Amino acid sequence: MTASAAYRFIDSDTHLTEPADVWTSRVPAKWKDKVPNVRWVNDGKSQCWFVGDKQMYDVGSSANAGWPEPFPSHPPTYATAHPASYDAKARLEYMDSIGCWAQVVYPNVGGFGSQEFLKMGDSELMLACVQAYNDFQRDWAEPDPRRFVTMIALPFWNVEQAVKEIERSAKKGHKGVLFTAAPQDYGLPVLADRHWDPLWAAAQAHDLPISFHIGSGDFLEESKDNYTQKRLKADGWAVTYARTTTNLLLANAMQLGDLLLSGVLARYPTLKFVSVESGIGWIPFLLESTDYHFKAADVRGARPEFKMLPSEYFHRQVYGCYWFEKGVSDELLDKVGIDKIMFETDFPHVTCLYGNVDESIEAGIGDKPESVKRRILFDNAAELYKVDLN
């Protein structure tokens, strides 16, 4: 029996709780005390990530699936976390149990756009960390490389290095590129700047879709008013998390609007982009608004390279991912396009679908024709990432 017959869906967004030796086992000895590493803290009760001597967060803070206590409580160690969060063989067993053929896998420690490495300050060390992570991903996928869609992390702060890393990692079996949707947050040119053209060209040449995952910008910047002390004091952790997460979804809407009006899609007509972990309900508004103001401002008159409306570029080259939305209407599917929607679970994060995957699918698109469900749940991701179904 083929994968497409035996499995119900492909998961377009999951995360990997990185094992402790990802970087320490893959960089030269001179950097082992500077790269991300895991240490015991809290009198030996917790395992925590450190970069140098800077403490980051518990290893289980990205692995809440199945944890019985309410947020912000989380597993303090690998041993107390869901094994599928960090172990590939356990992940495959979990995938089989929920009818999932393949998963697109995103990082945690390096940030959702590799921005944490940028803080290290040493360009050689930063590049080594990115390369170590990309090499690790394919090693981790070894139990069944067909079923793990891994994404190329980029040294986005250096376009020449980023292009070389796309070239290097594409040969290893990666199926997409992870890129920050807000490079200007790090003092770099905006998406529309021709500075990025070599990167777009490299991704297009290798037919690798580019992912804009939520939180790939500097959402901890004080001016963003997210995890600030005044918010935590007034709201507490649970409310702050819920509010900030929603803000990040809406930030992706703004970043996608930036992309649609950047000219990138016009210049690179076969390059695909994915808005990850951001839902789809806001997409019709974004498309209607950008089209309206595109016409009102006579963008074509000012920028003749735009041969189509923003919504037409979206329908040609951009995808969205959904997981929590219920009662998805025919109108929403029509406006977004059933061939531009993928399903995700966000496993094993706090907001992931866990123990309720089938129920969530039914609540979202259960009343749609089987052909529509199959396209959203399976076929779109299989085609975009060229998933091996044999």
Image (cartoon, grey):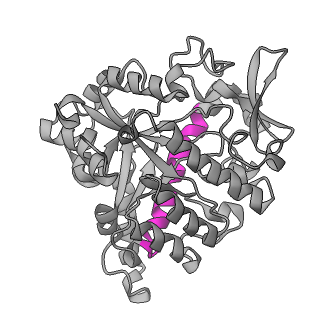
**Is residue 112 visible to us here?**
no
Is 262 magenta? The answer is: yes
Q: Quadrant of residue 181?
A: bottom right
**Residue 235 location (% of width, % of height):** 69, 28
**Residue 25 location (% of width, % of height):** 70, 40
- Give the residue furthest to the front: 29
The mark tally for this picture is 0
| 339 lies above or below 272 | above
| 14 lies above or below 40 | below
**Residue 309 location (% of width, % of height):** 32, 73
99 vs 181, left or right, is left
- Give the residue furthest to the top: 68
At 56% across and 45% down in the image, what residue appears?
248
284 vs 221, left or right, is left
Q: Quadrant of residue 304?
A: bottom left
Assign the N terminus to one quadrant of the image.
top left
At 81% across and 15% down in the image, what residue appears?
44
**Is residue 356 visible to us here?**
yes
Closer to the camera, 287 or 154? 154
Is 210 magenta? The answer is: no
At 70% across and 62% down in the image, what residue appears?
186
Closer to the camera, 217 or 140? 140
Magenta range is: 242-264
At 25% across and 26% down in the image, what residue appears?
362
Q: Main secondary structure of the magenta part?
A: helix
217 vs 90, left or right, is right
Assign the C terminus to one quadrant of the image.
top left
| 362 lies above or below 284 | above
Closer to the camera, 309 or 26? 26
**Residue 228 location (% of width, % of height):** 75, 40
12 vs 236, left or right, is left
